[in-house]
Amino acid sequence: MSPPVPKPPKRIKSTDMLIKVHLRDGCECLYCGKKTVRLDTHHIKLRAQGGSDVLENLVSLCWTCHAFVHAHPDKAEELREILNKRYRYIQEQML
Ligand SMILES: [Zn+2]
Ligand SMILES: [Zn+2]
């Protein structure tokens, strides 16, 4: 028996979800605030760790910050905080 071949990371299939994430984040990088047309969607809890494609686990990042947070896994907590702030901000706007 050969060992199972590791699957390559899957891309998020739902364009709907990508649009929702980017809209929530104001179409800018949640980490540095840069507005760019090429926003990535990053899983705060990595897929490899069981993170799923839910809004609460996804953030918009520019390429630079995306590479940065992958090089610094300890930034996950900070990303979560930034995302919480974003949700508070949205709630205030709706009041
Ligand atoms: Zn950025
Ligand atoms: Zn990522």
Image (cartoon, rainbow, N blue to C red):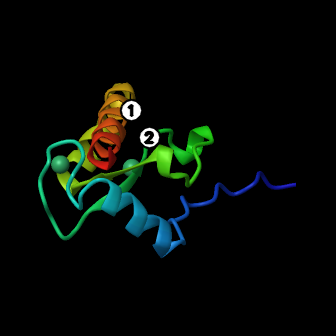
Q: Residue at x 27, y 47 (%)?
A: 93
Quadrant in which the N terminus is drawn: bottom right
> Residue 35: x percent and y percent?
13, 60
Mark 2 surroundings: few (<14), some (14-19) or many (≥20) residues within 10 A: many
Q: Residue at x 51, y 65 (%)?
A: 12
Q: Which residue, given by chain and number where applicable, does mark 1 sit on? A: 80
**Of the residues shown, which amino acid type is indicated by label 1?**
Arg
- Whichever of labels 1 and 2 marks the residue nearer the N terminus, that label is 2
Mark 1 surroundings: few (<14), some (14-19) or many (≥20) residues within 10 A: some
Of 66 and 92, nearer the camera is: 92
For the residues carrying marks 1 and 2, which lies nearer the camera in this image? 1
> Residue 78: x percent and y percent?
31, 27
All told, the count of numbered labels is 2
Lateral position of residue 93 relative to residue 21, left or right: left
Q: CA distance from mark 1 to mark 2?
A: 7 Å
Q: Give above or below for 40 relative to 73.
A: below
Lateral position of residue 85 relative to residue 8, left or right: left
Q: Residue at x 49, y 44 (%)?
A: 56
Q: Residue at x 54, y 58 (%)?
A: 9
Q: Quadrant of residue 48?
A: top right
Disc 1, disc 2: CB below 8 Å?
yes
Q: Which residue, given by chain and number where applicable, does mark 2 sit on? A: 44
Q: Residue furthest front?
A: 95
Q: Secondary structure at mark 1?
A: helix
Quadrant in which the C terminus is drawn: top left
Q: Give above or below for 80 relative to 8.
A: above
Lateral position of residue 2 relative to residue 50, left or right: right
> Residue 84: x percent and y percent?
37, 33
